[in-house]
Amino acid sequence: MATVIAGELGLRPTATELATADPELLVAAADTVMAAMPSRWGRAALRSILFSPVVDGDVLPATPWQALAGGVARDIDLIAGHTRDEQRLFTVMAGGPGDPDEALRDFAPGPDGERHYREAFPDGDLYELVHSDWLFRMPSLHLAEAQVAGGGRAHVYELTWPAPGMGGVFGACHGLDVPLVFGNLDRGGPAVLIGPDPSPEAEALSAEMRTAWTTFATHGDPGWPAYETEKRLTQIFDAPSAVTAYPEEASRLIWRDVNWCDPL
């Protein structure tokens, strides 16, 4: 991608030459490349998330899943998790959901992925489910499973508390865990999710999550059991919170045989 974008400006993709480019022209060149060749970059282009870490063999020598499964971080404990309704934020921003049939064709894994989703979620919002799973939920879970496979310890969580802002349209959406963890509930973008006056319930959940993260950073224990592939214990953050088996089991089974080192 860097080669193609630099070529739009007559440059080579080196730090020296790119440093001479007008930043606005770089952005314009990137927009041109992304708009003109959406099929060139695979599924990632369908979500406009092309700019992300690249396995280059130098700065990033292997995919995170390969590295963790190989034990590179077995001595570094990990928290990994996601929200329940990851896609909801983007659905609201887009003005409503897209075509579920198209979403399944684009993102469901393997030749039978579409059928598996329809069988597992006959009454579910398939558009939101497959987007949430492909981009957020299943990669997060697999990261934890790779850490465990490599001999390390991981703690998994899911946030299911629905954001009360704007009448509750966001659900437990992407990014909701961030203001709760940092205690920023009434300023900037988080205020849209939480509402203008954070409720006692929101304040209590935020305090609970902050305690978990700071305790983990200090002592390596967030207050719930480490994830393992038999019980799959997961911290559910809600009001009230609980520890249960991993709640998105149907999605996990659909994605369990995916080779996460292949382009997705």
Image: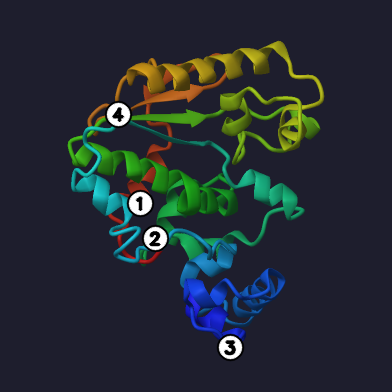
Residue 49 coordinates in the image, percent (x, y): 55, 61
- Which numbered disc flags the more N-terminal residue, 4 or 2? 2
- Which numbered disc flags the more N-terminal residue, 1 or 2? 2
Question: Rounded to the nearest whole Å, what is the CA distance between mark 1 and mark 4?
Answer: 18 Å
- Which numbered disc flags the more N-terminal residue, 4 or 3? 3
Residue 152 coordinates in the image, percent (x, y): 22, 34
Q: Which residue is mark 4?
A: 227
| Amino acid on which the number 2 mark rests in the picture | Pro
SS of the residue at dot 2?
loop
| Amino acid on which the number 4 mark rests in the picture | Tyr
- Above or below residue 223? Residue 232 is below
Q: Which residue is mark 3?
A: 10
- What residue is drawn where x is 62% and y is 84%? 9
- What residue is drawn where x is 40% and y is 54%? 116
Q: Nearer the viewer, mark 1 or mark 4?
A: 4
- Which numbered disc flags the more N-terminal residue, 3 or 1? 3
| Amino acid on which the number 3 mark rests in the picture | Gly
- Above or below residue 234? Residue 259 is below
The reply to whether dot 1 and dot 2 touch (C-beta < 8 Å) is: yes
Number of residues whose C-alpha sits closer than 10 Å to that of mark 4, classed few (under 14), some (14–19) or many (20 or more): many
Q: Which residue is mark 2?
A: 109
